[in-house]
Image: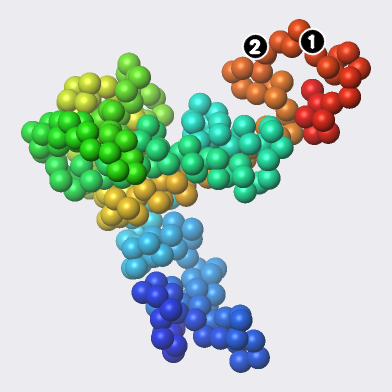
Amino acid sequence: MSEATQPYISHIWAEEAEPDNPFEAKACYCHGYDVYGDLLGKAGWAESLYLLFRGERPLPAHSRLLEHLSVALMNRGPRDHSVRAAMNGGVGGSAAATSLMAALAVGAGQYGGAHEVFHAVNLWQTCGQDLAAWQTGLRALLDNKEVDIWLPVEHAPGFEPNGVSCPTPVRQTLAVLAAHTGDGALRWLGDNREELEALAGCPLAMTGVAAAALFDLGFTAEQAEMLFLLLRLPGAAAHALEQQALGWRKFPFIGSRVELEDDPGAMGVPTIEGLEP
């Protein structure tokens, strides 16, 4: 590992400036690792992401766990609120950044969003692998009606309030991820899922699996919230671009249900460029 010779800009990052251009870096160090000399070409996405947030090189099992979690969260599909927000931006002709900002805004909340993962990780930190503690923790969280930036929590974090049974992809993801954690939160969640669902009054959601995985990886609730936002962006971006090309008539689930009685395009009336049927 090449050590940085310049003082760290922050606890995360150090740089050496190019001798002929102080506005560009000659070498960049992430927690002591030379990014373009040591990491590039040797470390994968999951290893680099773990290093950036945790400040240390991950164990091989941690790398595999984060890699598998990234695949599971990469694209939750058009039923996901954040993906649909990006699709709305794309079909409306919004700029790329606008579509992604829409996905982040809608996917940040407490219903299937990143702040729900924040609460769930906090519950893991408080309750651990104790069903009685989970019962107490969930009750205390739901009984708390204080309002700050966020409104009070309305359902058990990590669970689907409108669900009937645990969705197949959630169970599949939990099974794969639990194989890389030994006796961690994911393994315990798999063994006690039905009991926890009974306490929550609703089935486990993907947010619950993600929270357990990020907790097993050692991330704080704040780090888990940020990573959950980040890891869901690829699907939002891809669907926004696809919907931009397809148009609103082919919008999933509703495009075929919208009928214009006075369609200006059919009547020969000029339409706004980029919004024609």
The label nearer to you, 1 versus 2, is 1
The answer to whether residue 113 is left or right of residue 204 is: right
Q: Which residue sits furthest right?
A: 268
Give the percent coordinates (x, y) of residue 237. 60, 42
Mark 2 neighbour class, 10 Å CA radius: few under 14, some 14 to 19, many 20 or more: few
Say what secondary structure mark 2 lies in: helix
Question: Between marks 1 and 2, how big is the CA–CA gap?
Answer: 15 Å
The spot of residue 222 in percent (x, y) is 32, 53
Question: Which residue is at 28% across, 54% downward?
Answer: 220
Please name the colour scheme applied to the rendered image: rainbow
Foreground residue among 255 and 214 = 255
Dots 1, 2 in contact, CB < 8 A: no
- Which image quadrant: the C terminus? top right
The residue under label 1 is: 262
**The residue positioned farthest toward the bottom in the image shown:** 19
Question: Quick one: label 1 or label 2, which is nearer the N terminus?
Answer: 2
Q: Specify few, some or many for label 1: CA neighbours under 10 Å numbering under 14, 14-19, or 20 or more.
A: few
Where residue 150 appears, as percent x and y from the top left, is: 33, 40
For badge 2, the amino acid type reads: Arg
Residue named by callout 2: 257
**Residue 71 appears anywhere in the view:** no
Q: Position of residue 14 (x, y in %)?
A: 45, 79
The amino acid at mark 1 is Asp
Please name whichever residue, 206 or 277, is drawn nearer the observer in this view of the structure: 277
Q: Is residue 179 left or right of residue 86?
A: left
On residue 167, which mark appears?
none
| Residue at (60% x, 86% y) in the render | 22
Is residue 115 among what the camera can see? yes
Label 1 residue SS: loop
Residue displayed at 21% across by 26% down: 200
